[in-house]
């Protein structure tokens, strides 16, 4: 099993290394390597998945393999691999979507000047994402977390000649960094109080009560901030719509199906770290995000922007589900959403490839030109709208039921997540069918572009078909075996810290026996939550009815407005002009940030600059001037003292030499005079002594 | 007793002194290198006269006379070498005037 996991992890890395080293010299610039490595990784991941989910079929199954990575005195850090049912599902999501996106890119990116580098980056991303889901401790998770951030940056800014693309890449990197700082603080709090980074160690520490009370809330919120940044939750969602500047397959892989889901995965993986306060914040942030993003998507006209806001909204669903205690439902939505959202993005890519515009209102009537794209997009649109029978319906319904049960259990303001999500469900159906009708039905609005449109090549349509099939069968056979996910992915046992007494709700909970809850409840593990089976049963039907009603209403309104043209969208936008402008400008998030954050930062930078000039520079310059003076003095001493001594000595020697030189005349007879004179001198000395 | 009495050592020393003086004078005054060489020969021969004379009048063996023979042989060799040098100088400088040959001066 370990070997299989290592193969899955290292295949994309090998592809990255090969493509980076010799990619441009390989035939077809090496795209075969990337596609092959990803497909092979998917094949192995599928084997692992089948073995773990259907072979072992144990909700409590998990295994780790680890080795020492770092030893510093008493501190030691292990790196290792964690495998459980959730990991097995994530492996399939990542490798399958990645394979399909790689395949699709062969057609979509054909002829790009940096074709080889594109596939190298994609493979690096797949490797990082796999590392993220396989990591068995917080440090490993954090390392791969940053690596996916890096590859996201590289791929958003892939067409860096475009100013908007490089700016979007910077924005994505900086915005997610804010969340990552919170996550790092969370990790540090865990390290400080528990002193262990492995999931098992952390969970055990929390069960012992090493980390509890408001500090636990802080750690949970900190870690959740990482998820807020990565999964584009309000208020850090602003980077994701801009990230659509990247190539469309990248948007499908990174900014729809996998990387942005890492935040959801993080919350799910670290479920026992959060306490009820943190969960309430998570549920609130998720549901508000789901609602706000859905409303913005109504007025967006760029096909990719609609999908981007839809992604933010759906991620909000998952987060809200997790925060409301619907652990399985939230992660189930991550599983189903990955397929139909990747399909929606790839379908949009196929359309953009055909008509060379992203503006929906330049399209229209593409059903006749692109039948396969049309059909697969229809499947995905139905799935995301929550039409019964498709995957999105099951997961979204489960989340709605979970949040309703949460509201019932606590009452009052805790109904808010459910209400927001229910409304968002209707809006989701509306804007998705708006996109669908505007793009594929009716009359072409731009005849020039319509005439040039054509169905994409087979290398692009096959991934669409595969993902369309997955959009249906990822839940198993609808209404028959659609419980397989809920049977194996169950919430870890919570409640140890809740019993520490800071949560009155937990004390009131009849489900205080966590193990019993974990074994008997299909949604499982509500030890910390006051949500009981009665609540769940009571919530089931209303949520189901509400979900179907809202999506039906949304689809009907979209049909009347954009399919039939009975209702005029332009007229409504005039009636509700303030609301329309608010949505059109995305609640002015960017503008507010421009004023609050960018201006403030620039002002601070200006102040820092003044401080720099008048204080730091003055000090530095003063020191410089002082040194110059000192150096001038030392130079004088050197010039007249030391040099004078050395030069004087030299001058003396030269003077002697000059005098002695005169002796050597070159005339033999002068020398003879010389030594005769000396001889005579010696004789005289001898004589008269 | 005259200074030129041949039975007395002083007569020989006198001749030797005269030869040495003449040789020295030739060495320092002549500008022709060959003449300088001839002066050197005179100095050598004055030394020879001294050797022989002292050997005849003061020594019991013939070591002084043997030395004179050595000096003669040496002088012959020296003359050959010196003449060769002078010839080489002539080839190089086109003169054998010792005042002209001063290329070792600084």
Image (cartoon, helix red, strand yellow):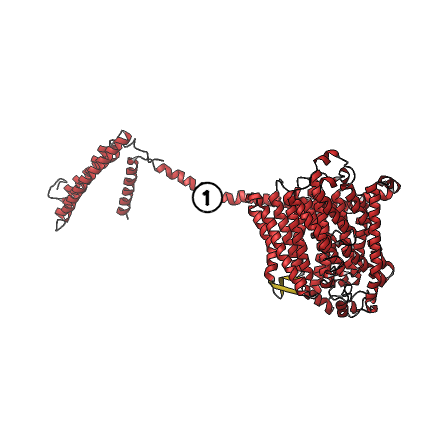
Give the camera-side residue of A672 and A151.
Answer: A151
- To which residue does mark 1 refer? A649
Q: Residue furthest left?
A: B7
- Decide which of A223, B106 is in the foreground and name it: A223
Residue A543 in view, yes or no: yes
Where residue A238 appears, x then y in whole percent?
76, 47
Q: Is residue A9 left or right of residue B72?
A: right
Q: Secondary structure at mark 1?
A: helix
Instruction: Classify residue A142 by image quadrant.
Output: bottom right
User: In the rendered view, does A320 fall on the left or right side of A53?
Assistant: right
Image location of residue A435, percent across then percent down: 78, 44
Image x and y of residue A458, in percent: 65, 44
Mark 1, Cα crowd under 10 Å, few <14 / some 14-19 / many 20+, is few
- With respect to residue A440, does A509 lie above or below? below
Left or right: residue A683 compared with residue A436 = left
Quadrant in the rendering for residue A322: bottom right
Q: How many marks?
A: 1
Q: Is residue A356 above or below residue A9?
A: above
Residue plotted at (35% across, 38% down): A663
Question: B34 or A380: nearer the eye?
Answer: A380
């Amino acid at each position: 099993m370990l070997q299989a996991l290592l193969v899955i992890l290292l295949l994309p890395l090998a592809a990255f290394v090969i493509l980076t080293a010799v990619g441009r010299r390989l035939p077809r610039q090496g795209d075969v390597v990337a596609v092959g490595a990803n497909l092979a990784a998917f094949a192995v991941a599928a084997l692992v998945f089948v073995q773990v989910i259907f072979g072992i079929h144990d909700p409590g199954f998990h295994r780790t393999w680890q080795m020492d990575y770092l030893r510093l005195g008493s501190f030691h850090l292990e790196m290792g691999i964690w495998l459980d049912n959730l990991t097995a599902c994530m492996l399939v999501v990542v490798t399958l979507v990645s394979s399909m996106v790689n395949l699709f890119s062969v057609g979509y990116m054909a002829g790009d000047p940096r074709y080889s580098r594109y596939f190298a980056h994609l493979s690096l991303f797949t490797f990082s994402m796999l590392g993220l889901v396989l990591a068995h401790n917080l440090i490993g998770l954090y390392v791969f977390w940053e690596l996916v951030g890096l590859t996201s940056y590289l791929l958003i800014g892939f067409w860096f000649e475009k100013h908007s693309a490089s700016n979007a890449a910077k924005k994505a990197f900086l915005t997610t960094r804010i969340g990552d700082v919170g996550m790092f603080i969370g990790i540090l709090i865990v390290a400080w109080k528990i002193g262990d980074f492995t999931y098992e160690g952390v969970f055990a520490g929390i069960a012992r009560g090493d980390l509890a009370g408001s500090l636990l809330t802080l750690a949970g919120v900190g870690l959740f901030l990482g998820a807020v940044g990565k999964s584009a939750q309000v208020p850090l969602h602003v980077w994701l719509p801009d990230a659509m500047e990247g190539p469309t397959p990248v948007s499908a892989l990174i900014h729809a199906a996998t990387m942005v889901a890492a935040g959801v995965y993080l919350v799910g993986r670290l479920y026992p770290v959060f306490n009820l306060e943190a969960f309430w914040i998570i549920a609130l942030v998720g549901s508000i995000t789901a609602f706000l993003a859905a409303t913005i998507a109504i007025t967006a006209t760029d096909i990719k922007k609609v999908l981007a806001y839809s992604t933010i909204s759906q991620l909000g669903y998952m987060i809200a589900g997790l925060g409301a205690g619907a652990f399985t439902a939230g992660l189930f939505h991550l599983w189903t959403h990955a397929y139909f959202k990747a399909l929606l993005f790839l379908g949009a890519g196929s359309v953009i490839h055909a008509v060379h515009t992203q503006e929906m209102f330049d399209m229209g009537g593409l059903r006749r030109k692109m039948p396969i794209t049309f059909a697969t997009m229809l499947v995905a649109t139905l799935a995301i709208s929550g039409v019964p029978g498709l995957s999105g319906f099951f997961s979204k319904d489960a989340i709605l039921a979970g949040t309703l049960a949460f509201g019932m259990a606590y009452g009052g303001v805790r109904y808010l997540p459910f209400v927001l999500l229910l409304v968002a469900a209707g809006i989701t159906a509306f804007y998705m069918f708006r996109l669908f009708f505007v793009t594929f039905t009716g009359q072409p609005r731009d005849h020039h572009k319509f005439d040039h449109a054509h169905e994409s090549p087979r290398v692009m349509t096959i991934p669409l078909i595969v993902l369309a099939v997955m959009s249906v069968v990822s839940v198993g056979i609808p209404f028959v075996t659609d419980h397989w996910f809920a049977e194996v992915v169950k919430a870890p046992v919570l409640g140890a810290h809740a019993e520490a007494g800071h949560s009155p709700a937990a004390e009131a909970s009849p489900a205080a026996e966590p193990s019993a809850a974990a074994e008997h409840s299909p949604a499982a593990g509500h030890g910390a939550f006051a949500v009981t089976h009665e609540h769940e049963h009571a919530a089931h039907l209303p949520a189901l009815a509400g979900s179907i009603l809202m999506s039906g209403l949304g689809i009907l309104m979209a049909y009347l407005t954009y399919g039939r043209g009975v209702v005029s969208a332009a007229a409504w936008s005039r009636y509700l002009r303030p609301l329309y402008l608010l949505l059109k400008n995305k609640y002015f998030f960017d503008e507010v940030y421009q004023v609050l954050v960018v201006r403030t930062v620039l002002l601070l930078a200006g102040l820092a600059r003044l401080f720099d000039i008048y204080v730091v520079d003055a000090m530095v310059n003063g020191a410089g001037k002082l040194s110059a003076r000192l150096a001038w003095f030392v130079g004088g001493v050197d010039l007249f003292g030391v040099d004078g001594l050395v030069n004087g000595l030299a001058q003396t020697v030269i003077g002697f030499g000059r005098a002695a030189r005169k002796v050597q005349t070159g005339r033999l007879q002068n020398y003879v005079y010389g030594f005769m004179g000396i001889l005579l001198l010696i004789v005289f000395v001898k004589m008269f002594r | 007793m005259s200074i030129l009495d041949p039975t007395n050592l002083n007569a020989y020393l006198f001749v030797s002194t005269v030869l040495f003086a003449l040789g020295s004078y030739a060495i320092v005054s002549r500008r022709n290198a060959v003449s300088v060489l001839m002066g050197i020969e005179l100095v050598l021969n004055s030394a020879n006269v001294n050797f022989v004379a002292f050997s005849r009048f003061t020594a019991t063996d013939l070591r002084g006379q043997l030395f004179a023979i050595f000096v003669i042989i040496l002088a012959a060799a020296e003359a050959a070498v010196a003449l060769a040098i002078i010839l080489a100088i002539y080839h190089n400088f086109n003169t054998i005037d010792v005042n002209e040959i001063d290329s070792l001066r600084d």
